[in-house]
Amino acid sequence: MGVECKFLEQGKGAEILATGVVRGQEVIAALREIYDPRHLDRQEYQIVDKSHCTEYAVTADEIATIAEVDRQASLVNPNIVIAVIESHHLQFSLTELWQAHLGDCVFPTKSFQSRGAAMQWIAEHRVGH
């Protein structure tokens, strides 16, 4: 199926929904949409929901590119927190690789197995909340 983006709370939040077989280029395109300058300044959080993926077909090079896109966005708006919802061990491994590539990126990130836990963490870590 792929990747779908939507904005929440008048752009304060962004959500990436990944379903079915997900390819790296789809994730990169979604991030570029979410980080468009028209949206980036007001963002406070992101939810990356990979819980409905049947296959996360993203290469190590694509994960490095994804991390670099995130790193560049953090230079413009360092106040975004990112919660990743996932359910398969392979996806957790790829998320850990992404987090390792982020390096000095200032975005706080954390993985969850439920949307409720992710939303609670976001509420606790959003700037000004």
Image: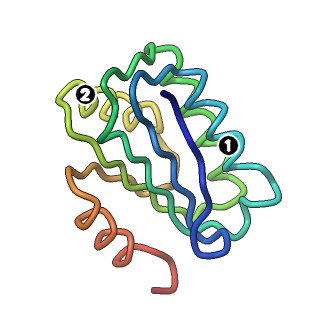
Residue drawn 23% across the image and 65% down it: 117
Q: Position of residue 69 (x, y in %)?
A: 63, 36
Between 67 and 36, the one nearer to me in the picture: 36
Nearer to us: label 2 or label 1:
2
Residue drawn 70% across the image and 39% down it: 32
Q: Which residue is mark 2?
A: 93
Relative to 27, residue 5 above or below: below
Lower position in the chain sequence, tag 2 or tag 1: 1
Amino acid at pointer 2: Ser
Relative to 124, residue 43 above or below: above
Q: Residue furthest front?
A: 1
Marking on residue 72: 1
Give the crowd class for mark 2: few <14, some 14-19, many >=20 residues within 10 Å.
few
Residue drawn 51% across the image and 14% down it: 61
Q: CA distance from mark 2 to mark 1?
A: 23 Å
Q: Position of residue 124 (x, y in %)?
A: 34, 78
Between 103 and 27, the one nearer to me in the picture: 27
- Relative placement, left or right, of 86 versus 84 is left
